[in-house]
Image: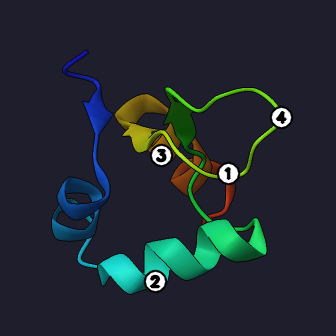
Amino acid sequence: MSDLLNEKQVAERYNMAPGTLRRQRWARIGFPYEVIGRPLNTKRGGVIRYRVSEIEDYLAKNRKL
């Protein structure tokens, strides 16, 4: 599970504010993430985790030249 980062770790690693990550999740844009431990058919609960490999893929695909 060392490939999984929490919101604070992602914010520090990619020099972003944690609030930016929250807004992007709300708007369904930005880095891909996983919700772990959320009950089915609910929109609350669980923890948010980001997979480093998925973030790197996202950045490579959305790179502006």
- Res 18 quadrant in image: bottom left
Type of amino acid under label 4: Asn
**Pointer 4 or 2: first along the chain:** 2
Q: Nearer the viewer, mark 4 or mark 2?
A: 4
Is residue 64 visible in the rendered image? The answer is: no
Q: Position of residue 15 (x, y in %)?
A: 23, 77
Q: Which mark is residue 53?
A: none
- Residue at the image position 48 percent from the left and 39 percent from the top: 46
Q: Amino acid at mark 2?
A: Thr
Q: Quadrant of the N terminus?
A: top left
Q: Secondary structure at mark 1?
A: helix
Along the viewing direction, whichever of 13 and 49 lies nearer the viewer: 49
| Residue pointed to by mark 2 | 20
To which residue does mark 4 refer? 41
Q: Which residue is mark 1?
A: 61
Q: Which residue is mark 3?
A: 55
Q: Are marks 1 and 3 in contact (CB under 8 Å)?
A: no
Q: Residues within 10 Å of mark 4 (few under 14, many from 20)?
A: few
